[in-house]
Amino acid sequence: MSKKDINTNMPFLSIKDLRVEYKSDGQIVHAVNDVSLQLERGKTLGLVGETGAGKTTIAKSILRILPDVGSRIVNGEIHLDGENLLKLPETEMRKIRGNKVSMIFQDPMTALNPVLRVGDQIAEVVRLHSDSNNSAEHEKRAKEMLEIVGIPAERYYAYPHQFSGGMKQRVVIAIALACNPDLLLADEPTTALDVTIQAQVLDLIAELRNKYNTAMLLITHDMGVVAQVCDNVAVIYAGNIIEYGSKEQIFRHPSHPYTIGLFGAIPDMNEDEEWLHPIEGLPPDPTDLPQGCSFAPRCKFVTDACCKESISMYKTEDGHDCRCCRIAAVKKGED
Amino acid sequence: MPKTIEKAKKQSEFVRIIKQMSKNKMAMLGLAILSAEIILAILSPYIIPYDYSHMDMVNTFAKPSFQHPFGCDDMGRDIFSRILYGARYSISIGIIAVGIGTFFGCTIGATAGYFGGQVDNVIMRFLDVIQAIPGMLLMIVISAVLGPGYFNTIIALSIGSISGMARLLRAQMLKERENEYIEAAQSINCSKFRIIVSHLLPNCISPMIVSATMGVAQTITVAAGLSFIGLGVQPPTPEWGAMLSAARQFIRQAPHLVYFPGLAIAVTVLALNLLGDGLRDALDPKLKN
Ligand SMILES: Nc1ncnc2c1ncn2[C@@H]1O[C@H](COP(=O)(O)OP(=O)(O)OP(=O)(O)O)[C@@H](O)[C@H]1O
Ligand code: SF4
Ligand SMILES: [Mg+2]
């Protein structure tokens, strides 16, 4: 492939070798370690992993809203529509935040400012990205967004505490979608909600995504959510993508011992089982990652070879990669 | 019908706060007392029955009576007149000094609290150094350098209250900053200034208000301390604190010399606290209705 080809075929979002560290109490937290992923317009990539795996950190890196103090993007490239966001001057970046790329936050209970009216919070993002100073126009757009997410426009003047969790999350979604973003970063948009509301909110997100052809990075640790909305899946463990493929590939042939374990942790309706099978052990300490495969301490299939040097991605099917040097053995063990 | 609802709800935040306040009876009482005091203070030169510095040796230590409703002091000066006239000094010193202190304290505290890291470190270490000096001593030093007098007292008192305010706001900001709505504000491209002013400050304001209203009371008494040691506002200017401390030595033989200035301070403080509480509640939309 010539260089020119790479450029023209560049996916809409392409993250390459992203590495992010936090400094806390004099220790370095290796939150994201050489993550690469791609996402096409109108598609949804599910980013799945346990708590602390670095999912939120990846999303914040894309928007460049990591804390000023104590965090550092060590290396990597984030190309959006051909532009490297990490090289963009702050003034250019400001046009992107909330406009071309927006984010739905993990916890709707704290993602809204308690002392501002919900409508004004939607109008704020509209105003920040609009050329006009006509606040009536911004307000109109905010009301329109409220209706779109299923809240009557009269509730514009309510305060967040007057809303239920599901309604708050709808407002957060309205804020994220108010400027018709090309890329939506949805950080566990439904984790804080109960199951029925969860389904409604997911439907809403999927519907709006289809309508506006938005690309979406959906962060979750819920395989059910992945099944419902995603096209592709990246499984992340200790800040590293360990398996990547289409939803069908990951669900039909999970290849990495960790992914297999994740599926083992879902109760199977067809079997007479009462308990989940959580994966034994805990994720590694991000300040002190093991050499070689970071899953090795919890892996049934571990051998000496796993712990020597970092494992690269192996192809198992077309478009399905797995970061494990014993795929064949794992597959047999599985059968 | 929906239109009227919309109109009613569309009032500005300011109007909402005022409306909310006006429903709070205690806050209104505080406001009434304070307004009365301020009006009396402004009008005092025209309405006081005696000149505040007029000495009448016949009436030294006179008990309250019809001629002298609050009695007379050790020099036979009419305490009622002195208190009315002194309100000009005491109330204005308290409010202006706390106002200035709060303004600078908030600016410094907000900077430290929002930016954190090195900025925070430098600011806080500097405040540590200032706070290592006992507050009273600091104000004595400043007023000694500036000399006595009304404006110098205000400057000394406001400098003295900056670091406490800065610390309080910083702590509050550090706590609020952790909330996701701050990240959410960043993610929609709010500038730092905007995040501080329109997202963080309104969420940090209530302890500041409480502390400022308390601060006015404290400042009035500290101003008294300063005039007692010959700094601050000078006699015969009838500043309440100065009257109070001058009367201490006569507390056994003529307690009314202490009662009335003390009462004046206490009533003012009470009114400010009622008002501060009401304001705090009105600012918090959760306590609405
Ligand atoms: N501001 C910070 N300072 C220091 N360490 C941090 C900071 N934010 C995150 N971390 C650490 O970085 C790692 C990745 O955090 P991140 O928030 O990205 O995880 P996550 O995958 O989103 O988890 P969750 O599912 O719980 O949201 C964790 O080990 C976390 O402790
Ligand atoms: S590389 Fe080795 S330790 Fe890691 S998942 Fe594969 S088999 Fe297990
Ligand atoms: Mg997270």
Image: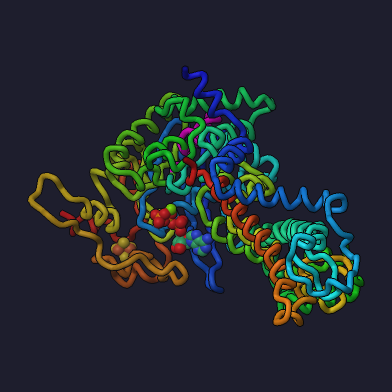
Coordinates of residue A225 in the picture (x, y in percent): 31, 41
Coordinates of residue B160 in the picture (x, y in percent): 76, 69
**Which color mode does the image show?**
rainbow
Whether residue A3 is visible here, answered yes or no, is: no
Of B221 and A137, nearer the camera is B221
Coordinates of residue A295 in the picture (x, y in percent): 34, 64
Classify residue B258 as left or right of residue A98: right
Q: Quadrant of residue A2?
A: top right
Whether residue A156 is visible here, answered yes or no, is: yes
Coordinates of residue B88 in the picture (x, y in percent): 81, 57
Q: Residue at x 46, y 36 (%)?
A: A171
| Region rendered in magenta | A172-186
**Where is A105 relative to B261, above or below?**
above
Q: Quadrant of residue A152?
A: top left
Classify residue B80 as left or right of residue A281: right
**Where is A231 relative to B63, above or below?**
above
Q: Residue at x 65, y 41 (%)?
A: A94
